[in-house]
Structure formats: structure tokens, C-alpha cells
Amino acid sequence: RTVVLVGLSAITFPATARAGSIFLENDFFGSNVHYFFSGTTYKPFTLGSVTMSEGAGLGPSLDAPNSFEAYCIDINTDVFESSIGLPEPPATYSAEAALMSGWSDPSGLITLPGAGSRAAWLYNTYAATFSATQLDERSALQLALWNTLYDVDFSVSPSAGNFYVSVATADTAGNAASYAAIASLANGFLTDLQNYLGQAALSDAAWLQLSVTTPATETEPAKTIDAQDFIGPLTPATPVPEPGAGMLLGMGIASLAAFRSRKSFLRRS
């Protein structure tokens, strides 16, 4: 009976993470801002989103032919950095997909209880609503996501909080990007989150950990470089049980059948 339980557990509680690859079509360069986190000034930082498609092995909502916008969630990791081997889009990255409800910053920064689910609510509510020209809105959503994951004050305005922004400059399209406008939009998203916090706690989305493995050379071995983590559309957790799990279940069923046959035989005796 113990073997049966072990086998059933392997089937019933499979890991929710998926491994595969994903193609980054392009990145949106929105507004550059100075932001503050835990007393440290980061300047300037480009805000915005990345278009991903042609995923493989990650699950229905992340695999081809779907295309979606994703937003950064790892605050202190470069999105693309060619000098260390991370290519600019278009490029294919290796990807691990899990659920935002289980998110924790891989860099070891503060992780607030329930922050992943709250960020998922923001993403699910707004990410698909912006047009290609709504650069400030997409920049503001990025700020709101970071504030949700790393702060508790529901505001990106300068304050004593853990995360806030200060000065915005012109965006790469040459449009004047107003800090006040972007901050106001971000705070509006965060106010909506605060008003719907009960529903937000039930939200989920995909947590995408991206990496690139560089090829080996005559002087350097192959190495895997961790890239930025992103939030994307929810991937149902439906991994196929491993053969070993099925074997355990089969052994358990066979053992149970043998046990019952022996017990029946003894009763007849």
C-alpha cells in the first residue's frame, strides 16, 4: 500500500515548472527613468516590454503560434547585455516556466508574501490592453509591477518606500516622456490593485526565467548566463508524468493486487 501511495503522489503532485525555449521578437524601449531601490540610485533605466513568441516545451499559452508581451520582474538583472553574452532581440533563449504565485527574486532580494499573485493581477488586467503607441502606459505598468514586487506602499512617487522613481527623460522615439504622467499612470494601476486586492490574491501568471548557453571555444568552456526574468500569460500546469512515476504506480497496483489475493487465500484456508 505504501508503494501505491508513493506512485500516486508522483502522478498527483508533479512539478509545475517547465523547461523549453522561447523566441524574443523585439523589445519596446519606453521611458528612461532614475529609480531608487533600498537607498541605491539606478540611472537611467529603460522601461517597457518584450514581445515573445515561438516558444517550445513551455505549455499552450507560451508556445507557438502565440505571441505576447512580457514585463521584467527581476529588478537588478540586465534584460540584454551583449558584453556578457546575452543577445539583443531577435534571439532565442532557454526558458524555465513556473507560476508567479511561487515567485521569489532569484537574486536574493526581498520577496514580499503574495507579491507574485498581485503582480499577476496587474499583468492580467492591463498587459493586453495597450496599443503599440501607448509607450507611457507600458512604462507605467513596468513601474507598477516592480513596486508590487518590491514595496508595500502602492506608490512610485518619491517617498520613504523601498522602491520609487525620480526623473524621466525622453524616450527613444523622441517623444517627451513626462515623469509626472508616467508616475500618475503607475499609481493609478496600483490604486486599482489595492481596491481589488481580494481578487488579486487569487491571480496567477507565468514566471519565465531566461538564460543563454554560450558555445565552447578553444579557450573558454560553454557557460550558461542567467538573463532577466519576465512575467507572461498563464501556462496551465499539466506536465506529463515521468516514466519512473508510472512504473512506481504499476508496481504499487501489482503489490496491492498480490496482497489482496494472498489475504483472500488465507481467509479461504
Image (tube, rainbow, N blue to C red):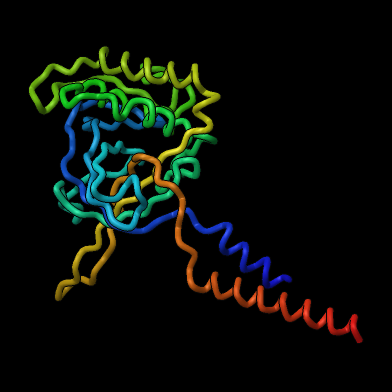
Name the residue rendered at 17%, 27% in the picture. 132
Closer to the camera in the image, 5 or 147: 5
Quarter of the image for residue 126 reads: top left
Quarter of the image for residue 211 reads: bottom left
In the picture, measured across the screen, residue 104 lies left or right of residue 2, that is left
In the picture, measured across the screen, residue 189 lies left or right of residue 171, that is right
Task: Please state the horizontal and vertical placement of residue 142, each as a whole percent of the image.
Answer: 31, 29
Quarter of the image for residue 119 reads: top left
Closer to the camera in the image, 5 or 84: 5
Residue farthest left in this picture: 174
The C terminus is located in which quarter?
bottom right
Residue farthest front in this picture: 268
Q: Is residue 181 above or below residue 247?
A: above
Task: Please state the horizontal and vertical placement of residue 230, each as a whole percent of the image.
Answer: 33, 42
The N terminus is located in which quarter?
bottom right
Name the residue rendered at 41%, 39% in the picture. 205
Name the residue rendered at 11%, 19% in the picture. 175
Task: Please state the horizontal and vertical placement of residue 208, each as a whole percent of the image.
Answer: 35, 47
Q: Is residue 203 above or below residue 267?
A: above
Task: Please state the horizontal and vertical placement of residue 137, each as a whole percent of the image.
Answer: 26, 21
Total marks in image? 0
